Amino acid sequence: MTVSLSIENVTAHYGTTKVLEDLSLHIAEGELVSLLGSSGCGKTTTLRLVAGFLEPTAGRIMLGDRDLTRLPAHSRDIGLVFQTYALFPHLTVRDNVAFGLKQRGVSTKERNTRANDMIDRVGLNALADRYPANLSGGQRQRVALARALVIEPPLLMFDEPLSNLDAKLRVDMRVEIRRLQQANGTTALYVTHDQEEAFSISDRVAIMNAGRIMQLDAPEVLYSRPANAFVADFVGFENMIPMKAIAESGDAVRAEMPGGATLSLPKDTFTVPAQNFILATRPEGLLVAPSGDGIPTTLGLRTYLGRAYQYQCETPAGELKANGPLTQPFESGSNAVLIPQAEQCCLLPAEPA
Amino acid sequence: MQRKTHPLLIAFAVLTFLFLVGPLIIIIGASFSDTSFLTFPPRGLTLHWYQNAFEISAFKRTFLTSLMLAVGGTALSMCIGIPAAYAMARYRVELPRFLGNVFVLPILIPEIVLGFSLMKSLAMGINLPIMVSLLVGHALIVLPYCVRVVGASLNSFDFSIEEAAVSLGCPRWKAFFTVLLPNVKAGIIAGFILAFITSLNDVSVSIFLTGPGVSTLPIQLLAHMEQFFDPTIASVSVLLMGVTVAVMAIVERTLGLTFLTK
């Protein structure tokens, strides 16, 4: 059974503090959507609202055609995987996995069969009679995953499930999570602060800040076409140059940056969104060249990145980071220009001050 | 390589040990003395005082009262203490800080004052039967141990375990019994033992609340000593120590060890 999850205009408060504001999010059947953001952005609050551990002050939460908003947490039928694993220390692996089935009144025999099957699927059948204290972190998280999956929930939710694991295991486990989620076709909501983790396994990612979704898109879109300065900064657009369009000729817009330097942006590759806008780009989006139509700069420290050199660049618009080719190293202190590479730059509307 | 221990350190260790164990040795020795008064070292050896302890019916009667109070008072106190400790651990952020200290008040207030005020309010004020006011009094003096010790094991409990149970379809009240309690069992047992012993040995509160026909063993001992001052009180004390040790051992065996091996 696969269903969709709809969070509709939800507002939530802790005491008198507003932590979520008019948040709407639709997750399609079988889709995995991640909530990504730094701590305090409201991602965990959103998950806890859906789980039923918190109540919204306004709005509605629908799972398929079931209204969850006022339903008690234990009737919601959602598989949850916690950051701390939250295994029952007094139960064996098998009893941990069978716990949800027991609550549903499944007979002992069927319970054990289904629990064993699931333990098998996460590769732990040799450890079924152990207690959680005798398992490693990765094994514990597999048990937690099996425990959430065995009840065949229409919705799976993950609350930072990998942040207590070491780097290598994190990569293995996220693949495992994605594999199981896709095999079951379960709709899933995944909360994390790790961008790589979110981007690698999600169908879509919602980047959150201060209780709101800043952008909800496929990882590929977020990575290359952020919709606003916050998302651009979040996904690593290290250079943000405020600009102002000052003149328009037939095929280009002339724009001025702080410090007075101007840049000509060809209309066929750049779309200027407003008179005041931001030119956002990663270091590889600014090409260091000896001369040309670009941002004049004095090159500072040079670092070697393997595939390119990176320069700290003093420009009239402030310090920028730019990459230069390996075939043509520049000396520190020399003058050059930084040429924006259209396909790696974004022109964003300026934030209202 | 040999580790060198300073002789002064050894001397201190021995002195501390003697200081703790000495009184026990004196009581045990005195209980076997063949004299009609308490003395140490014992002169002669007899089991007469132990026989006497079992023959005096007041000791038997008050021992049963003490036992009932220790079990009942501790149980009553746990019924209040466990939910209180739970609420304080679960809602640590939301609840005011001083609340935790309120539950230690019975330890802070001199027991004599506590006993007197309980007598004034319970026995004289609202005319509770002696046994009931004793029960309430004992529940009150052991409450700090219940709340503190159970609270300590709840503080290291990860409450997302409880949420995990709820997400798997277990109602919250049921999760409290099936998931939370089994995991703080060690704390409950420890709290129970501490409270039980405190109640069993209490004098200062009981002395105000006992009355005609109802007394506890320590109070009866006190009364006996005032009249006779013979080695019977030593033999009863030794028996009381024995009961205490036995209770600890039984609780450890039945609840404590199964908890560890499970």
Image (cartoon, helix red, strand yellow):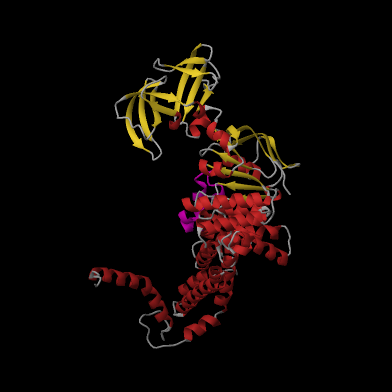
- Total labels: the figure holds 0
Examine the rendering and report whether any part of residue A262 can be seen: yes
Identify whether A182 is placed above or below A231.
below
Q: Position of residue A187 (x, y in %)?
A: 67, 45
Q: Is residue B110 above or below residue A318?
A: below
Asked whether A36 or B234 is in front, the reply is A36
The residue that appears at 47% across and 50% down in the rendered structure is A167
Q: Is residue B44 left or right of residue A133?
A: left
Work out whether residue B125 can be spotted.
Answer: no
- The residue positioned 53% from the left and 24% from the top of the image is A348
* Residue B215 position in % (x across, y down): 56, 69
Q: Position of residue A259 (x, y in %)?
A: 39, 17
Where does the image place residue A168, in percent across and percent down from the top left? 48, 52
The reply, left or right, for residue B177 in relation to residue A336 is: right
- Is A107 magenta? The answer is no
**Residue at the spot x=51%, y=74% of the render?**
B249
Above or below, A255 relative to A228: above
Residue at x 52% of width, y 56% of height: A138
Q: Nearer the viewer, residue A274 or B253?
A: A274
Answer left or right for A51 relative to B59: right
Which residues are the magenta region? B88-115
The front one of B44 and A131 is: A131
